[in-house]
Image: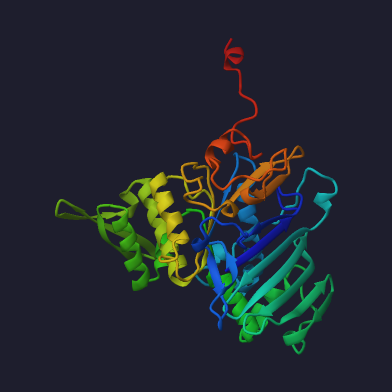
Amino acid sequence: MLTQFTVKNYKSIRDEITLDMQAAAISEHEDAVIKILDPESHEAVESFLPVSVLYGPNGSGKSNVLEALHTLESKVLRPICAVCPNDDCSNKGKKMPIKPFLFSETSKNEPTEFEIFFRTDEAEYRYILHIKNDNVVYESLDRVKIETGRRSALFVREKDLINLKGAFSRIRISDEMSDTLPMLSYLGITYQRNKIVKDIFRWFEQEIDFLNYGNPLQEMGMAIAESDTLKKLILKMIQEMNMDIENFRVEEKEEELQVYMQHNVDGYIQEIDLADESSGTQKLFGLLPFIAKSLVFGTTLVIDELDAKIHPLLLRYVIELYTDPVSNKKGGQLIFTSHDLSTMNSEVFRRDEIWFVAKGHQQNSKLYSLVEFKNKNGESVRKDAKFDKQYLEGKYGADPYLRKIIDWSEINA
């Protein structure tokens, strides 16, 4: 589970911003959060959000927030993929340049800073990584054991100095480790069998996925991985969407995946190649396996522009799969960007699940949630407010409209 992510000096993000998946102490949809129960009293001791959505105008930097998270994952996993390549390396281990905020002499010469808190069955980890010109200038790793609540530092790295602590104190490292190689990646390569290292990399490799619909056929086939459990859930979702598709199969031909959809139209059965379906259907079937995996195994799914090519009713259906504790028993999370306002209301979201990204006067992106937003009078947004209407009126700062409209009559005169 992702519990918090912070980034500073990355592309349009100049100042530190934090996407917090910890649930705020508010009264709406209290049963829709992911509750961590005390093993003895069975009472909720912590609560996390199953969903977060980022709104904002084009060019505000919404995608950069999600891309920063993906970039951190890639920086950690890419060295491991270079040594032990697998099917996930094309996405998780691809090279993603780390670029600082360029509209400032100060920031473009400073490192990009990442901080992430994530939770496994064993522990909650805090990992910090600062990168400048692709070199690691600072790095640290801490953990809190779930069973005991004991907090401990595992390592701190400042340029050439590495201090191994606690459970890592007896680990030996090379004196010639590259400045571009994160210490965490080095541990993943060299100490794969270490219990803590294995737990951390299981999260990075299996517990968080990024989807951008680059190749829905490939993405679908990779996600299904011949899992009967996932296939059954996908078919169930299709039936709930009232589509005329009653089955599908994935076939590998000449090292390429092909997906065939079985339609039932008034009792007449016909199989169609997914490549011949509409782009909306292709995207939907590129999405469903990832949704199924996230719900079945309780993983975090990050999607840029989830609403593109998906009908608003289907979008709401997907969101409610996560906010419904019956369908989301394992604590899956969905984080996405959107322009769709049909779901921006109190029936679908809690105020702490709605985030806005807006550009400042110096082209720097700012991130803030609806629950922490206050107007000029210092008043918070009411939980029964018309979120979509007030957003369109520009009351939340992230004005969805163009600031200046072109006067075509002058241009065409």
**What residue do we see at 76% from left, 51% from top?**
15
45 to the left or right of 233: right
The image quadrant that residue 135 belongs to is bottom right
**What residue do we see at 43% from left, 50% from top?**
315
**What residue do we see at 66% from left, 39% from top?**
397
Q: Can residue 380 be spotted in the picture?
A: yes
The type of colouring in the image is rainbow
Image x and y of residue 361, in percent:
75, 37
The image quadrant that residue 295 belongs to is bottom left
Please, which residue is most extreme toward the left here? 267
The quadrant of the picture occupied by the C terminus is top right
278 to the left or right of 361: left
Image x and y of residue 259, in percent:
33, 60
Image x and y of residue 359, in percent:
69, 41
Image x and y of residue 270, in percent:
20, 55
The quadrant of the picture occupied by the N terminus is bottom right
Please, which residue is most extreme toward the bottom here? 170
Q: Where 271 sits versus 62, above or below?
A: below
| Tag count | 0
Q: Can residue 85 be spotted in the picture?
A: no
